[in-house]
Amino acid sequence: MPSFGQTLRAINDMRADGVIEEYAIAGAMAVLFWTEPIVTYDLDVLVFLPVRGLLVSLAPIYEWATKRSYRAEKEHVIVEGMPVHFLPAHNELADEAINTAVAKEYEGVPVRVVRPEYLIALYLEGSAKTPKRRERAAALRESAGIDHSLVHRLMNRFSLTF
């Protein structure tokens, strides 16, 4: 059975090994830290990768995974039984989401989690904006502890709408 805690330990090891510079849990698994959980089958991890040439390459992640007997399946790496989707930061919003991530803990394992305001914004990006993600953004927007002024600023800065 997949272990979220063991998967997080492995991701922290990946950072300690220099395979990724920094990370933040995003997507539906991040939502569970802020409001009611959402059913999902994978873990989305936004990452900063070390610069190695002109192109962004996930090769170091796959090499690291292979050395630890984690297999790849399509766009996922199966880490401790859990499908993990490593997503290189793709724009300024994703960069900020990683840089402002909140340090949390899950079963004694430290984890960096995208703030809910940034999750809302990421869900509303043009390339990601689906009915399901709009619903998630709306649910997050109504949860306790949201900084509505930050959501408003992000929506304006990045030209996002519900």
Image: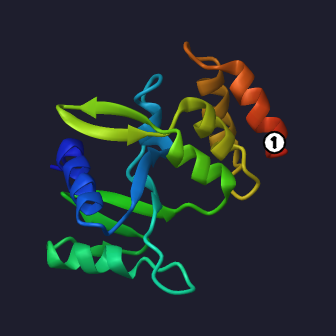
Q: Is residue 150 shown above or below 16?
A: above
Q: Quadrant of residue 15?
A: bottom left
The residue located at (61%, 25%) in the rendering is: 139
Residue projecting furthest to the top: 144
Tell me if 42 is positioned left or right of 158 in this view.
left
**Spot occupied by residue 103 in the image (x, y as percentages of width and height):** 37, 34
The quadrant of the rendering that contains the C terminus is: top right
Number of numbered markers: 1
Q: Which kind of residue does numbered mark 1 sit on?
A: Arg
Q: Position of residue 33 (x, y in %)?
A: 40, 28
Give the image quarter of residue 30. Answer: top left
Image quarter of residue 136: top right
Examine the rendering and report whether any part of residue 39 can be seen: no
State whether residue 150 is above or below residue 159.
above
Q: Residue 29 in the image: x percent, y percent?
A: 41, 40
Report the front residue among 89 and 142. Answer: 89
- Residue at the image point whose x is 40% and y is 55% from the top: 22
Label 1, residues with CA under 10 Å away: few <14, some 14-19, many ≥20: few
Under tag 1, what secondary structure? helix
In the picture, measured across the screen, residue 128 lies left or right of residue 87, that is right
> Is residue 121 something one can see in this rendering?
yes
Q: Residue at x 47, y 62 (%)?
A: 48
From the viewer's perspective, is residue 52 above or below residue 89? below
Q: Return the residue at label 1.
A: 157
Q: Residue furthest bottom?
A: 53
Q: Position of residue 111 (x, y in %)?
A: 31, 40
Q: Is residue 131 left or right of residue 43?
A: right
Residue visible at 47% across and 33% down in the picture: 31
71 or 116: nearer the eye?
116
